[in-house]
Image (tube, rainbow, N blue to C red):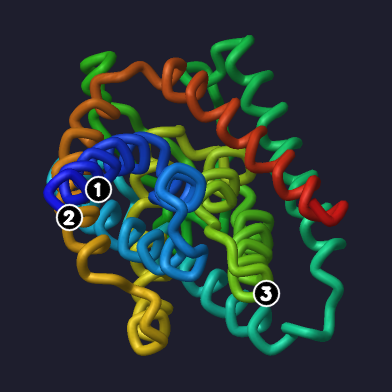
Amino acid sequence: MGFSILLMMGVGLATGIVGAILGLGGGIVVTPVLTLAMGLDIKYAIGASIIAVIATSSGSTIAYLHDDVLNLRVAMFLEIATTIGAIMGALLTGVLNPKYLYFLFGALLLFSGWNMYRKLRRSAESERTVQDDAIATKLKLNGTYFDKASFKQVDYQVTNVPQGFVVMLGAGLASGLLGIGSGAFKVTAMDTFMKMPLKPSSATSNLMMGVTAAASATVYFFNGAILPNIAVPLALGILVGAVLGTRIMQVLPSRVIRMIFIPVILLIGLQMIFKGFGG
């Protein structure tokens, strides 16, 4: 029992660090470890993954809010799309064939990964120029943050708001219909379509994922899918890891974060396409 607790705290620590840096939540780390390495039933692994997402969001959001890195207005605006999409997905369960959605969203992630690779090659993070967007200006979505890696204040403008809203609608649809996390789509919507810098995109994604996960955690709890002996030490490790991850993310150059993010998002995209083929 003692070894299991320490193992869960160790997994949580790694999950919190990765989730806080990339804005992807904890499912990408927690679920494979619990199912493949520990032989836990997928039902309980998903329940633990939900707790991981909430803990990662809670630990990182406090730090990002304190350092004024995340964009609260963008988060609340896009959360509307995610919620609508999740409700639509729940209502369409059993009506649409999931394999086509796996293909669609897998292709979107592969496109986003390729687009990020192009940005990486031309070092576009510090040189991006964005035209004024009337919707973003009206909703006051533009923001600023202090980049601790370059020691300078970065002012950025948000653009392509409708496109970002549609991507987030699709992310919510995927979550409700396919039962998958949508952290990768959240970062994609902000970085690829709305032209936000990667650091505010990751920080804002962390906040949004916590809101989404909290809505479904109650269902998993009453279904008995959340085991306290796994969730508690996992959450404790994640809270510590998330705080560490926020500190690491802010001093890492955006180029390095993008280099970490690209293979992760490509892997998720390939996994979704593989599921579309029935894998």
For image coordinates 22% across by 70% down, the residue present is 228
Quadrant where the N terminus sits is: bottom left
What x and y, as percent, mark residue 278? 84, 56
Quarter occupied by residue 173: bottom right
Characterize the local packing of mark 1: few (<14), some (14-19) or many (20 or more) Cα atoms within 10 angstroms.
Answer: many
Residue at numbered disc 1: 8
- The span from disc 2 to disc 3 (Cα, nearest Å) is 30 Å
Measured from the top left, where is residue 246 in percent x and y?
23, 36
User: Quick check: 9 above or below 181?
Assistant: above
Who's the residue at 48% across and 23% down the image?
260
Residue 104, visible in the rendered structure: no
Residue beneath disc 3:
177
Q: Is residue 74 visible?
A: yes
Q: Earlier in the sequence, mark 2 or mark 1?
A: 1
Could you tell whether 206 is left or right of 246 in the image? right
Q: How far apart are the two marked residues, 2 and 1, measured between alpha carbons?
A: 6 Å
| Local secondary structure at mark 3 | helix
Q: Is the Cβ of the residue at disc 2 closer than 8 Å to that at disc 1?
A: yes
Circle 1 — which element?
helix
> Is residue 44 placed above or below 102 in the rendered structure?
below
Residue at image coords 36%, 63%: 48
The quadrant where residue 195 appears: top right
- Which residue type does callout 3 highlight? Leu
Q: Nearer the viewer, residue 31 or 269?
A: 31
Amino acid carrying label 2: it is Pro
Q: Which residue corresponds to mark 2?
A: 233
